[in-house]
Image (tube, grey):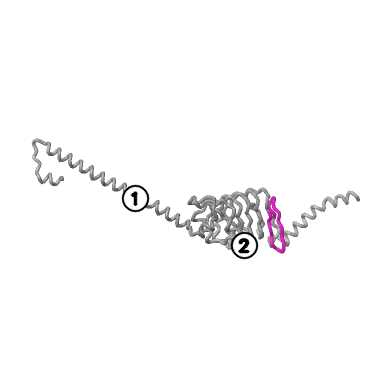
């Protein structure tokens, strides 16, 4: 009797596992509630809202097996260095993405493709981002945090700020670590723009100057060639005339001389 009882106790975890699996297959699978949770993360579900919590999990990349019904994704305080194209394409229900306090340096132009409509908050603060493609953010309806990054202030970043919805509580913390003009390094970008500085006009002026210098160089080269060609022909003509004059037995008609000259 004791051995039968022990055998029943030993088989109880297996029975529990298979009963849960059968329940998931029959009742949850059609609604996407049985998806697995990524390693080193915790998944919770409250009132139908799935949250995936991967904060401070020593991750160096964004997990690829995030449940499709995820609405809140916490990836902050990790070692993530990039956000590749279409990373979140299968997560159509996402409302918040927290990527703050990572080591992100590169964000591809289609990094957030597939989550544009429902996303409400995107936190990219506290990373190593210097530049970001305008296409990566302009189609998002979310409020975006870009503070505490080593930004290089130039035309593209200015266009991003014009077209996205920035978090008003952190917008003053977007600072130029470097700039197309050195005097703006270390200054808050919003203050620079409020003073009337337009980085896109600077870019246009730089392009115009470069084009002018190139055209002037070509013009100088053409003029130099024309001057050389004329002088060379004059010298040849003079030598030819002197040669004709030096011939003892030939009298050069005046008409020929005038024609040569």
What x and y, as percent, mark residue 123? 61, 57
Q: Nearer the viewer, residue 118 or 86?
A: 118
Where is 233 relative to 71, above or below? above
Left-right relation of 229 to 50: left
Tell me what residue is drawn at x 12 percent, y 36 percent.
246
Disc 2: which residue: 120
What x and y, as percent, mark residue 43? 70, 56
Look at the numbered disc 1 and give the secondary structure of its residue.
helix
Mark 1 residue crowding within 10 angstroms, few (<14) / some (14–19) / many (20+): few
Q: Nearer the viewer, residue 125 or 170?
A: 170
Query: Which residue lies most toward the right here?
Result: 1
- Range covered by the magenta-colored residues: 36-53
Tell me what residue is drawn at x 37 percent, y 50 percent.
213
Marks 1 and 2, how far apart at CA:
52 Å
Which quarter of the image is occupied by the C terminus? top left
In front of the other: label 1 or label 2?
Answer: 1
Disc 1: which residue: 216
- Whichever of labels 1 and 2 marks the residue nearer the N terminus, that label is 2
Tell me what residue is drawn at x 73 percent, y 59 percent.
24
Q: Nearer the viewer, residue 182 or 42?
A: 182
Look at the numbered disc 2 and give the secondary structure of its residue.
loop
């Amino acid at each position: 009797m004791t051995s039968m009882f022990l055998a029943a106790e030993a088989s109880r975890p297996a029975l529990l596992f298979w009963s849960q699996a059968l329940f998931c297959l029959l009742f949850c699978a059609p609604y996407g509630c049985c998806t697995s949770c990524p390693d080193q993360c915790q998944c919770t579900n409250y009132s139908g809202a799935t949250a995936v919590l991967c904060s401070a999990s020593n991750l160096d990349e964004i997990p690829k097996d995030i449940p499709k019904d995820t609405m809140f994704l916490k990836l902050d305080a990790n070692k993530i260095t990039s956000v590749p194209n279409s990373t979140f394409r299968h997560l159509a229900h996402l409302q918040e993405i927290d990527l703050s306090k990572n080591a992100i340096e590169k964000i591809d132009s289609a990094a957030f493709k597939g989550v544009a409509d429902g996303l409400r908050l995107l936190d990219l603060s506290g990373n190593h981002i210097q530049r970001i493609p305008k296409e990566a953010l302009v189609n998002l309806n979310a409020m975006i945090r870009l503070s505490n990054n080593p930004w290089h202030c130039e035309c593209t970043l200015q266009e991003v700020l014009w077209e996205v919805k920035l978090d008003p509580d952190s917008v003053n913390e977007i600072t130029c670590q470097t700039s197309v003009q050195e005097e703006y390094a270390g200054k808050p970008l919003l203050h620079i723009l409020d003073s009337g500085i337009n980085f896109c006009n600077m870019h246009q002026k730089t392009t115009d100057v470069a084009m002018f210098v190139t055209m002037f160089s070509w013009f100088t080269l053409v003029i130099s060639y024309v001057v050389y060609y004329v002088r060379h022909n004059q010298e040849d003509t003079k030598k030819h005339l002197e040669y004709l004059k030096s011939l003892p037995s030939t009298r050069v008609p005046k008409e020929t001389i005038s024609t040569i000259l």
